[in-house]
Image (tube, rainbow, N blue to C red):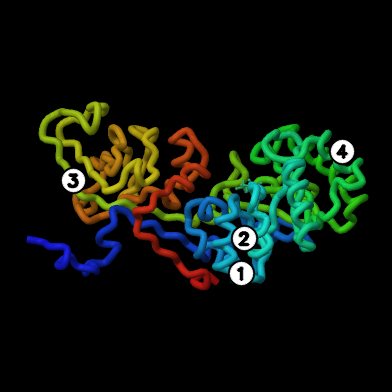
Amino acid sequence: MFSAASTPTRTQSRPEDRAGAILTVDLAALVENWRILKKKAAPTCDVGAVVKSDAYGLGLEPVARALHGAGCKTFYVAHLDGAITLRQILGPGPRIACLNGPNKGTERDHVAFKIIPVLSTPEHIQAWCAYALKEEVLAESIVQVDTGMHRLGLSAREFKALMNDADGFVGLHPQMIMSHLACADEAASPMNRQQLDRFRGFKDQFRTRFPDAKGTLANSSGLFLGPEWHFDYARPGVALYGVNPTPGQPNPMLPVVNLRARIIQVHRVDSPGHVGYGAAASVPEGAKIATVSMGYADGYLRSLSSVGVGVLDGIKVPVLGRVSMDLITFDVSNVPDSAAQVGGFIDILSNVVTVDDVAKAAGTIGYEILTSLGTRFHRRYLAASARI
Ligand SMILES: *Cc1c(COP(=O)(O)O)cnc(C)c1O
């Protein structure tokens, strides 16, 4: 019998042997992607890194450390807690901006941890200025304007009202004026030029009050629209992680993520039948099915049922039947028995079936595939210095 006292306090097996799947993040490829984006931008443009949502699911700490080590000086996160964690990881040097703005009562923490808030509403600006004046601090901020997305940012009317009010921006020390593109991944969309023109209008007016304020407009795809969209600070996220910022054209980025799921059983079907929940897929006699130890709870979306594809021994293997919470069944009938073995691994994300491919099959975007990646994988990080 086990008693609490006899429960071991440590395991004796390797974590990679316990895990159902192994996620490998190539930090050297990540850093190379950042350099590719830097080359794309004008030398005067500060190319930062958006590391919100745990660096798009790949791990804030290793990702931020690798980019910081390569010379990245500006980081963008969504929430204050992420920003504070990042400050603790990277120390006092880099600029850290918090995209979702300062919630009421958090001004003190922004200042203490040197987090630059993105101010998107008149209330943000009013509260931030009031705090700065009361505490007599010169705290940097970013002012966001809405150029057509209607998500975050001052409307033209709100901006005008603040500009016309002599006290409107008193106490403000804006580092940048910012806006966000709605359609940057569709290079032909007229929205891109429209938002650019509006942004220029805001920026020119803003600089009559704050001549040193810089501009920031481009996300990953924005960097590929052309130099006019680059301004002083670029905010790429997804391209750093290997997702194609130019859909429909060859991917200029290197793949960063590899995910392999462990085969825990191989079935040889001895009479025609069905596979998985709902008996949703049929299999003929002689079919070979490999079941892997990963499922929708690990971010392999249930919408990939019967449409997802993995790779085993260089051969594409389709998902057969419904994706379960912790299990996926693949048709490995075309794979030699020598490779379709318990203990082997099916590539879920690889150079052959990329994040973009899986996203397309699931009816979503690479962003969602990455940020859905689960917490149960054994994670390996390939060192940034491994690639010369
Ligand atoms: C997420 C985000 C980015 C990064 O976008 P990508 O498309 O991932 O490059 C940049 N700016 C803002 C405001 C964002 O919310």
Q: Nearer the viewer, mark 1 or mark 4?
A: 4
Residue 110 position (above or below residue 288): below
Q: Nearer the viewer, mark 1 or mark 3?
A: 1
Please tell me in which quadrant of the rendered image residue 156 appears.
top right
CB within 8 Å, label 1 to label 2: yes
CB within 8 Å, label 2 to label 4: no
Q: Which residue is mark 4?
A: 160
How far apart are labels 2 and 4 at the CA level?
A: 36 Å
How far apart are labels 1 and 2 at the CA level?
A: 9 Å
Q: Which residue is mark 1?
A: 70
Q: Residue 153 placed where, x, y %?
A: 73, 40
The crowding category of the residue bearing disc 3, from other C-alpha atoms within 10 Å (few below 14, some 14 to 19, many at least 20), is: some
Mark earlier in primary sequence (2, 4): 2
Rendered residue at 57%/48% (across/down):
251
Rendered residue at 66%/71% (across/down):
93
Q: Along the line of sight, which residue is nearer the eye, 351 or 322? A: 322
Q: Nearer the viewer, mark 3 or mark 2?
A: 2
Q: Please indicate whether residue 236 sits to the left or right of residue 197 in the image.
A: left
Q: Which quarter shows the N terminus?
A: bottom left
**Amino acid found under the numbered disc labelled 1:** Ala
Mark earlier in primary sequence (3, 4): 4
Q: Residue 222 placed where, x, y %?
A: 70, 46
Q: Which residue is mark 3?
A: 266
Q: Is residue 217 visible?
A: no
Q: Please indicate whether residue 146 sits to the left or right of residue 242 in the image.
A: right
**Amino acid found under the numbered disc labelled 3:** Val
**Amino acid found under the numbered disc labelled 2:** Trp
Rendered residue at 56%/67% (across/down):
88
How far apart are labels 3 and 2 at the CA level?
A: 41 Å
Q: Residue 314 placed where, x, y %?
A: 34, 51
